[in-house]
Amino acid sequence: MTDAVRTMTRRRSTFLMAMWALGAGAPLAALGWWLWTPLFYLGVLLLILGATWLLCVPMVSREPLSPAHRRYLRTFFPAMGGYVLAIFVFGFLQHVALPTWVMILVALLPVLPMIWVVVTIWRYTRESDEMEQRIQLETVYLTCGVVGLLAFAAGMLEMAGVYRFEGGLFFVLPAMFLIYGIAGWWCRRKYGLKGMC
Amino acid sequence: MNNRLRELRAAREWSQAQLAEVLEVSRQTVNAIETGKYDPSLPLAFRIAGVFELPIEAIFSAEEK
């Protein structure tokens, strides 16, 4: 894995991330269809993200990744793998009668790898050069704005009793990652860059 | 902001990647500066001036309106 990451290009990393999202999204959507609707929506979100990444692959350059980007990927893949695994465990166990303390542990299990991902993105931004930091600033601002507004609109609709979003808060983080990817692509275009991250 | 970065780099027969390595930025950043899509910070502009041994105003100039 280490050698593969060392020689990895931006295009190859985008392809691998697309494959990861599609590979994780399909079983999550299938499991969600069978067990729990929010899991189905999460799977669909990942499939959309994976398909978008896959469409971006031909546009991304074949340049080698920067050391900061390599470090980011080295952490991203295992952490996201842990997240999907923990979500699977939660999906299977959530309707099983378990003691409350076990259920708390199972429910909070997916949060642990996501802490790792958040720290990794923060470290990647700190280790990047000034233009990348500016792109990250614009991307994060757009992401917070869009997700915040969507959550606000959903909350208002719920309070009005018009529609109830099952597992609404559960989707805030996956939606942030989806919007972060799309906003990253949008912000990069301005600086003549291609790709989502 | 206008700049002569591409011209100065070409005169020294450096690639964007070589200049990027000296400046400790990515090649994409050098490309974005050369094409006018990104204006460097003052510290980076000073580093660029240092590399080419020229005053900042000999490399960067305000955009004419």
Image: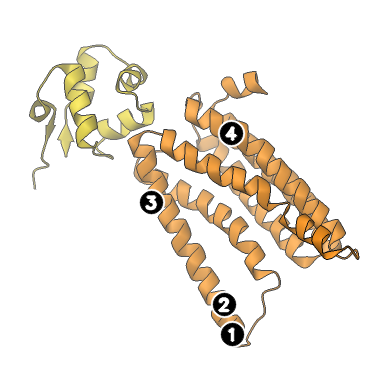
The answer for how far apart the CA atoms under marks 4 and 2 are is: 34 Å
Shade representing chain A: orange
**Mark 1 residue type:** Met
Return the mark for residue A138.
3
Within 10 angstroms of label 4, few (less than 14), some, or many (20 or more) residues?
many
Check whether the beta carbons of the residues at disc 3 and disc 4 lie within 8 A of each other.
no
Q: Tell me which numbered mark, 4 or 2, is placed earlier along the sequence.
A: 4
The residue tagged 4 is A73
Q: Nearer the viewer, residue A144 or B30?
A: A144
- Label 4 marks a residue whose chain is A
**Label 1 neighbour load within 10 Å: few <14, some 14-19, many 20+:** few
Q: CA distance from mark 3 to mark 1?
A: 31 Å
Identify the residue at image location x=19%, y=21%.
Answer: B7
Q: Quadrant of residue A3?
A: top right
Q: Are marks 4 and 1 on the same chain?
A: yes
Looking at the image, residue B28 sits to the left or right of residue A78; the answer is left
CA–CA distance in space, label 4 to label 1: 40 Å
Pointer 2 residue: A155
Rounded to the nearest angstrom, the CA distance separating label 3 from label 4 is: 21 Å
> Element under label 2?
helix
Residue under label 1, please give it: A159
